Image (tube, helix red, strand yellow):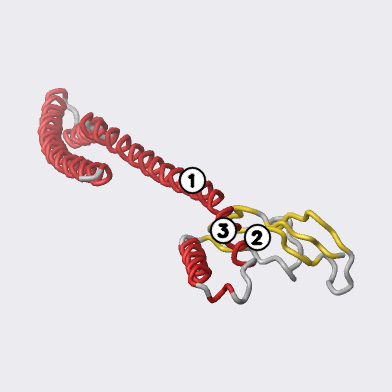
Amino acid sequence: MSNEEMVKEAVEEAKAKAAQEEAQAENASEDEEAAAETAGSDEAEAAEDSSADEAGKDGEDPDSANEDAGDASKTEKKKLFGKKNKKDKKDEKIDELTDRLTRQMAEFDNFRKRTEKEKSQMYEIGAKDIIEKILPVVDNFERGLSSVTEEEKATPFAEGMEKIYKQLMTTLEAIGVKPIEAVGKEFDPDFHNAVMHVEDEGFGENIIAEEFQKGYTYRDSVVRHSMVKVAN
C-alpha cells in the first residue's frame, strides 16, 4: 500500500470515528436538555404553587402571584437554556487531528510534486551531458561520409558506415534530439553562434550563409549551438 493510500485510509477512519462520537454526543446532549427542561418545568410549577400559597397567606391576589411565578419561571428557563452548549473536548480533539492530517497530506503532495520535478530535471541534465559526448561522434561520421567519392559509395564498407550513421541519427531523433536549421535561416542568437560575417548580395540581411558545425536541441532545449557565418 502506498503512502498516499495509507493517508487516505487514515482520514476515512478519523472521519468515521468523528461522526460516531458526534452522534453519541448529540444524543447525550439531547437527553441532558430534556432532563433539564423537565426539571425546570417542575421547579417552575413548584415555584408557582409556592408563590400562590404565600400570596394566599399574605392576602395577595393569587393571579398576580401566578404572574410573578410565571416571570420567574421564564427567567429560570433563560438561565438554563440561554447559554449554548460548549463543544465537547473529544470533538475539538477530532477537529484538531483532522486539520493536522489535512495539512500533512497537502505537505506530502507538495513534496511529491517537487521531488518528481527535481527527478525530471536531473534526468534531463544527465541526458544532455551524454548527448554532448555523442555529438562529436556524429560529426566524425558526417566528415568521413562527406569525403567518400562516388565510386567508393558503392563499396560494402561505405554502405555499412552509411547505415550505422542513419541508425544513430534515428535513435537520437527518437529520444528527442533534433538538428538546428541554419543555412538560409535568419540568425537567432538563441540557436546560432556567429563566428564569421560576410558581405554577400546573394543573401538577405542577417541571413546565415554557411554552417561550420551543426547544432542540436534536446526536447526544445539547446544542447549545442550551430557555428555559422552570417551575411550582411
- Quadrant where the image shows the C terminus: bottom right
* Image vertical order of residue 49 relative to residue 149, above or below: above
How far across and how far down the image is residue 119, in percent? 43, 44
Q: Earlier in the sequence, mark 2 or mark 3?
A: 3
Under tag 2, what secondary structure?
loop
171 lies left or right of 12: right
Q: Quadrant of residue 152?
A: bottom right
* Image vertical order of residue 151 relative to residue 191, above or below: below
Q: Earlier in the sequence, mark 1 or mark 3?
A: 1
Can residue 64 be seen at all in this image of the molecule?
no
Q: Dot 2, how many residues are within 10 Å of its Cα: few (below 14), some (14-19), or many (20+)?
A: some
The residue at 79%/67% (across/down) is: 207
21 lies left or right of 177: left
Q: Dot 1, how many residues are within 10 Å of its Cα: few (below 14), some (14-19), or many (20+)?
A: few
How far across and how far down the image is residue 120, in percent? 45, 48
Can residue 202 be seen at all in this image of the molecule?
yes
Q: Nearer the viewer, residue 88 or 119?
A: 119
Residue located beneath label 3 in the image: 138
The residue at 84%/65% (across/down) is: 231
Q: Nearer the viewer, residue 54 or 121?
A: 121
The residue at 10%/30% (across/down) is: 46
Q: For the residues marked 2 and 3, what is the alpha-carbon distance in whole angstroms?
A: 10 Å
User: Which label belongs to residue 214?
Assistant: 2
User: Which label belongs to residue 126?
Assistant: 1
